Image (cartoon, rainbow, N blue to C red):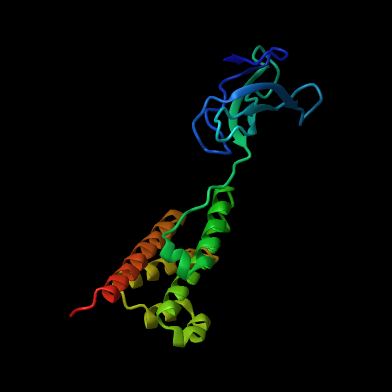
Amino acid sequence: MINIGRNGIQIDQEPNSCPVCNHLVSPNRTEIFKEINTENSNWSRYLEGLYECPSLKCGHLFLAHFERKSKSKGARDGYFTYTHSTPNLFKTVEFDERIATISPSFVEIFNQSTNAEQAGLSEVCGMGYRKALEFLIKDYCVSSQTDDAEKIRKMMLMQCINQYITDINVKECATRAVWLGNDETHYQRKWKDKDIGDLKLLINLVIHWVVSSLMTQEYMQSMQRT
C-alpha cells in the first residue's frame, strides 16, 4: 500500500505509464488529490490524483483515477485501487504512403473508427471500418480505371469488387471483409464466430495485397522488357 499523506488515504499502486506519450514511466506525484463524493458527503467512492510525466520529451500533467472497492466504511476505509489515467490521447494509425495517396479518406475514416473503438464505442466502430473498406476498395479501383470513376463510385461494393478487382488475393480478402463489415450494420449477425478483430485483420490483408499489387505495377512500369 502507498500512503499519499492525505487524511490517511492509501492507494494500491501508482500509474506506471503516461497516457499522453504512452511510454512506461515512473510519474512524479504531486500533492493534488481529490476525493469524489458521489453517494454521500461523508463517504467518497472515487479518488483523483495529479501526476507529471518525467520524460523531457513529454512532461505533461495527467490525472490518475482510483476507486474504493469496499462498499461501506471499515478498517480499510482509505484504501483505493488504481483504475486508469487520463487524458487517453489517440495515437494515429500509420499506413503505407501508397495507401495514403490513393485513398486519404480511407486513412481518415479508419483512424476515426479506431479512435471510437479505443473509446469503448464497440457498437459503432464496426460500421466505421466497413465504410473505410468501401473507400479503400473504390479508390483503388478508380486509381486504375479512371475512365469508369463515376460508375465505380455509384456501384454497390460487392459489384465493384467482382467487376474491377482482378488480383485474386485482394478480391478474396475484400469479399470476406465485406461479409463481416455488413454484419456490423445488420440487426442479426451471419458470421457469429467472427468479430471486429477478424474484420480488422481482413482489412489489413486487403491493404497488404493492394500495396503488393501497386508495388508490382511500379516495378513493371519502371523496368520494361527490352
Q: How many marks?
A: 0
Q: Which residue lies furthest to the front in this view?
A: 226
Asked if 84 appears above or below 112 in the picture, the reply is: above
Q: Which residue is drawn at 28% across and 70% down?
A: 219
> Picture quarter containing residue 187?
bottom right
> Picture quarter containing residue 41?
top right
Front residue (pair 52, 40): 52
Q: Residue at x 38, y 65 (%)?
A: 206
Front residue (pair 103, 45): 103
Does the rendering let one see residue 190?
no
Q: Which quadrant is the C terminus positioned in?
A: bottom left
Q: x and y percent of residue 165 in the render?
A: 36, 77
- In the drawing, does residue 4 fall left or right of residue 159? right
Asked if 62 appears above or below 110 in the picture, the reply is: above
Q: x and y percent of residue 181 in the render?
A: 47, 65
- In the drawing, does residue 45 fall left or right of residue 168? right
Asked if 118 appears above or below 203 in the picture, the reply is: above
Q: x and y percent of residue 56 in the render?
A: 56, 31
Q: Which quadrant is the N terminus positioned in?
A: top right
Q: Which residue is drawn at 26% across and 74% down?
A: 220
Q: Which residue lies furthest to the left in this view?
A: 226
> Picture quarter containing residue 79?
top right
Does the rendering let one see residue 16?
yes
Front residue (pair 29, 56): 56
Front residue (pair 110, 202): 110
Q: x and y percent of residue 39 in the render?
A: 77, 30
